[in-house]
Image (tube, rainbow, N blue to C red):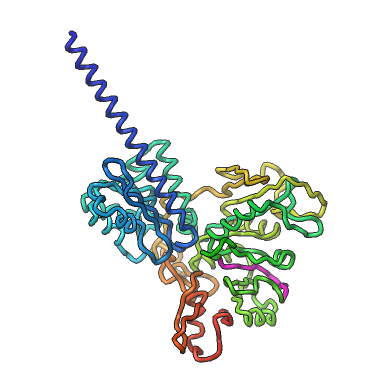
Amino acid sequence: MALSFAVVASSSSIMCKAINANNHSHLQDLSYIKRAALISDKSAGFTSPHPNFGCVIVTPSVEVVGEGYLYAQGTKPAEVLAVEAAGERCRGATAYVNMEPGDCHGDDTAVSALVQAGITRAVIGMRHPLQHLRGNAIRALRSQGLQVDVLGEDMQSKLVEEARKACLLVNLPFVHRAASRVPFSVLKYAMTLDGKIAASSGHAAWISSKLSRNRVFELRGRSDAIIVGGNTVRRDNPRLTARHGGGHMPIRIVLSQSLDLPEEANLWDLSDVSTVVVTQRGARRGFQRYLASKGVEVVEFDILNPRDVMEYFHDRGYLSILWECGGTLAASAISSGVIHKVFAFVAPKIIGGKNAPSPVGELGMVEMSQALDLIDVCFEQIGPDMLISGFLQPIPDLTPTIPSEDETFAIDPTVAPFETSIIFFYKTWDLYGAFSNFSPHPIQMPDEDGNYVTWFSVEHYYQVLPIIGSSITPNHVYIH
């Protein structure tokens, strides 16, 4: 009897140790996945229109021997950098990546790097959002004998969901673009405690603290473009620069139906970054020519509304847009369903004023039950201010479906797949938005003297190819 008791006790002890070991390993996996997501976010704003990738390599003795993240579009994959950092210690190690590797044109560099380095296990935070890439890298790794665990599939728990969400959040712009075919849009504003974004006179400098304004510069640096309306240009004459000592500078977009804009404005200075003015067809032709002479791009729409504008910039390859507009345009954007997240900086000030503007104009709601509730609300104190952020729309499913060309044609044979109702030549080089002539990435090309000249985009350069020998400069290109 004593012997039997001893065996049972011993077996139970072994089982407990095994469970504890599994739990410990499970927590380590989630910790390293979160680390991969964290480092991938370091390049936010630079990798667009690609996702943010991070990779962490850990030995069986639980030592981090290599890390890497995609620095920018066209640079080495995160997995390659991590493998290079780890060297021979990759043998038998585990690679943690926040997103399944994938390249729109079938490049398998990341997968090859992990296989050739001797990695034996890969833990993946989420599958690739693009349907034509989803699962490809996972199958390739498994076919090479690697154990592949995917959060939410091979690993499930409440803690797993938290780690999975961390992977999703660092690539929200990419996921939203894949799911809804519009850029991920954030509405940002600063207001007083009594809900005013300016005094009755229109004066608004400054509502929030310097610390809050620095946070805004960070938000700008993570965005492909910043949108303002004509009222903001006339009232505030903003520069809309990131002002963070170099790095990514988002394109500036002005939405103005009447084109009633001043001739002198900081946004017409293109020395740091370009500006696009979006207006209604036929508005102030003379002023359009004036803007063109300054190098400002003008785009016309038959009917100007935020939804069409966002679809247009989606087709130009933009992933994320920061709206820093006034209440009228903010209300229009919200009503159009193109705002996904809100950042509200609330300052402990009261300005009053019956006619003082508020952050969001008329939405047509008459009862409080109609109010829009934010999702996943966060509160953060920044100096004296309170930053309240949350989503206006649910985060898309992690496996969004993009219809194939055949599926699109089957739904409506009269409409060409992915056809836009405006113009055609600006569309991306492939159906998945990897890059386009209009993508907001400068290029350098040699002039007739062999000196390199910077152009704001590939399209700016192409527009002047027929007249390259003339006196035209990158600041005098009008794309219509």
Determine the residue positioned at 71% across, 75% down: 264
The answer to whether residue 374 is above or below residue 71 is above
The answer to whether residue 456 is above or below residue 12 is below
The count of marks equals: 0
Determine the residue positioned at 22% across, 19% down: 10
- Res. 136 visible in picture: no
Residue furthest toward the bottom?
469
- Res. 404 visible in picture: yes
Which quadrant of the structure image shows residue 367? top right
Q: Is residue 285 left or right of residue 173?
A: right
Q: Position of residue 52 (x, y in %)?
A: 43, 56
Q: Please name the predominant secondary structure of the magenta segment in the image.
A: loop
259 within the magenta span? yes
Closer to the camera, 76 or 390? 76
470 within the magenta span? no
Q: Is residue 32 left or right of residue 3?
A: right
Rendered-image quadrant of the N terminus = top left
Q: Position of residue 239 (x, y in %)?
A: 65, 66
Q: Position of residue 478 (x, y in %)?
A: 58, 81
Closer to the camera, 342 or 339? 342
Span of residues in magenta? 250-262
The answer to whether residue 287 is above or below residue 338 is below
Q: Is residue 25 left or right of residue 72?
A: left
Q: Position of residue 2 (x, y in %)?
A: 19, 9
The answer to whether residue 429 is above or below residue 146 is below
